[in-house]
Image: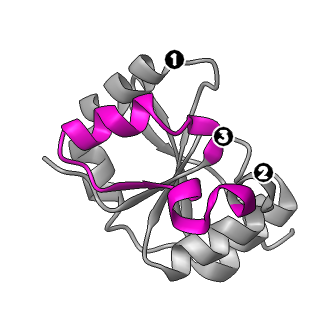
Amino acid sequence: MPAPRLLLDRSLGQRKLVARLREAGWDVTTLAEYFGDERAQSMPDEEWIGEGTRAGFVLLAKDHMIAARPLEARAVYLHDARVITLARGDLTAEQMGDLCLEHAAAIDRIAKVSPPFVFSLSPSGLRRKRLNWPAD
């Protein structure tokens, strides 16, 4: 089952994971493909969160702290972003691909949940993260 249209953060790499997901029929775009390599390397998270969301992407990132850091959490909240992060940052491209493909149906389901949200993806599935915005 193909997943929703995803924009992949630069920390996920630009070749192996992308190729794996595309081979499985997923619609994935890297930050470098969408914004150009130079801009993608230098843009702050809150910027690509906003622009990627406005373009209609579900955002896939390695950084599970997006929900906790105020600037990124604010961007998720203000732009009604739909973000999926990996629970562990030490996975190989092959392991990340396996994880995404194993949970494809769940990813497809949560992509339809009303935003804003950040879900963390682990071998046990998806878990909604508390968004650190608006500040308490």
Question: Which residue corresponds to the image point at 56% horizontal and 37% vertical from the top-left?
Answer: 12
Q: In the image, which residues are magenta?
A: 10-39
Question: Which residue corresponds to the image point at 45% horizontal and 34% vertical from the top-left?
Answer: 15
Question: What's the CA distance linking mark 1 and mark 3?
Answer: 16 Å
Q: Secondary structure at mark 1?
A: loop
Q: Are marks 2 and 1 in contact (CB under 8 Å)?
A: no
Quadrant of the rendered image containing residue 46:
bottom right
What is the three-letter code of the residue carrying label 2? Ala
In the image, is 31 to the left or to the right of 101? right
Question: Which residue corresponds to the image point at 64% horizontal and 67% vertical from the top-left?
Answer: 49
Question: Badge 2: how crowded within 10 Å, few (<14), some, or many (20+)?
Answer: some
Q: Position of residue 86 (x, y in %)?
A: 55, 35
Location of mark 3 (residue): 64
What is the three-letter code of the residue carrying label 3? His
Location of mark 2 (residue): 68
State which mark lies toward you, 1 or 3: 1
In the image, is 80 to the left or to the right of 5? right
Q: Position of residue 81 (x, y in %)?
A: 56, 70
Question: Which residue corresponds to the image point at 21% horizontal and 45% vertical from the top-left?
Answer: 105
Question: What's the CA distance linking mark 2 and mark 1?
Answer: 24 Å
Q: For residue 26: magenta?
A: yes
Question: What's the CA distance linking mark 3 and mark 2?
Answer: 8 Å
The disc at residue 114 is: none
Instruction: Please identify the residue farthest to the left as the structure is shown.
Output: 1
Q: Are marks 1 and 3 in contact (CB under 8 Å)?
A: no
- Tell me which numbered mark, 2 or 1, is placed earlier along the sequence: 2
Location of mark 1 (residue): 92
Q: For residue 15: magenta?
A: yes
